[in-house]
Image (cartoon, rainbow, N blue to C red):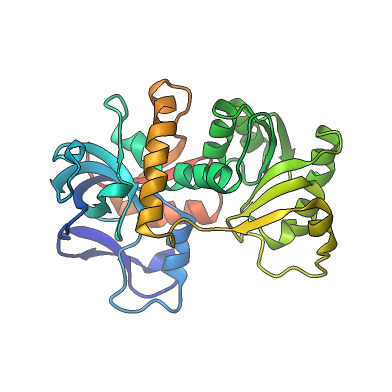
Amino acid sequence: MNAWSVQKPGGSEQLTLVKRQVPTAENGELLVEVSYAGINRLDILTRENPAMKKPYPILGVEVSGVVKANHSDNPSLEPGTKVAGLVKKDAYAEYAIIPAGRAIILPKEMSLKDGAAIPEVFLTAYQTMYWLGKLQEEETILIHAGASGVGTAAIQMARKISDARIIVTAGSQEKLDFCRELGADVTINYKKENFDEIVQKETDGHGADVILDFIGATYWHKNVNSAAVDARWIFIGTLGGVEVEHVDLSAFLGKRISFIGTGLSPRSDDYKAALAADFQKTVIPYFQAGKIKPIIHQTYAFADVAKAHQAMENSENIGKLLIKVKDA
């Protein structure tokens, strides 16, 4: 089969199309013929990783496609079933292995293209907001990088599931307008405004009950200022760096802030399976009802993976970037 790997760790110019054997599904796994694969920042970090060892891996963590072989005891996943999910490994390829417990069965009315925009961003948003952030109805949530894949997923779920008060940050008016269309109540251009001051003003000094933080170091002090008493601050990215100077921990004590660092990819198979099952039961009905939708910025041809990586690195996207592996 055709698949995308790297010649050596580095920039997008190191991406290379390779021939690999079609993988074999083991007990509890599905062999999926891939229709679309999602692009994620983790793919770029993997591509650049100087510690990566040969043979270099096939990139990617999520796909949509059609089940070709079912080696699980779940009769709902028989060959021909449309699924999406987090792969065991190797997503930028014509075939992939999905552990059966991670598979999200797509509704009949949902396209494989839309399905590919669900696994990583929606599962991450659901995990961080509800499993970790414990977002309650009518609480206030501050979502950074609101126009990102996870951000657009989080806005929709916070609106439709929790009717939360939603405050988002983004770096352009186009992105802010789109966030408002999805359901954000307050939009902040972080390049022009101090978001902590606006959060405090818009909440009458209460602050944000939940913070989804993709940024890290450069937002640290403003996030502390933005947090409500008993806030849950979920840390899921380091776009703004990892080193913070002059940290005053007294605010964490005074406000009783819970700081939780997380990542979905390193989680166990059992954790991912439980999350996928909860998501299938709780959120997929909102897709079926048309209340929540995948947000796709652009779909690239299988030959144009490098262009997709460049778009991700330049933060050009509002929502998901996909690569089309096979006509569906």
Instruction: From the viewer's perspective, tell me whether residue 167 is left or right of residue 313.
Output: right
The one nearer the camera, 29 or 172, is 29
- Residue 100 image offset from top left, x and y in percent: 25, 48
Q: Which of the two residues, 298 or 190, is positioned nearer the viewer here?
A: 190
Q: Is residue 232 left or right of residue 150?
A: right
At horizontal 44% and vertical 72% (from top left) the residue drawn is 10
Residue in the image at 44% along x and 62% along y: 266
x, y percent for residue 119: 40, 44
Residue 237 lies, with reference to residue 158, above or below; the image says below
Residue in the foreground of this view, choosing between 94 and 7: 94
- Horizontal relation, residue 1 to residue 136: left or right: left
Q: Is residue 151 left or right of 169 when viewed as pictured?
A: left
* Residue in the image at 31% along x and 66% along y: 5
Of 5 and 12, the residue lying toward us: 5
Tell me the quarter of the image containing the N terminus. Answer: bottom left
**101 w.r.t. 140: above or below:** below
- Name the quadrant of the C terminus: top left
Dividing the picture into quadrants, the one containing residue 168 is top right
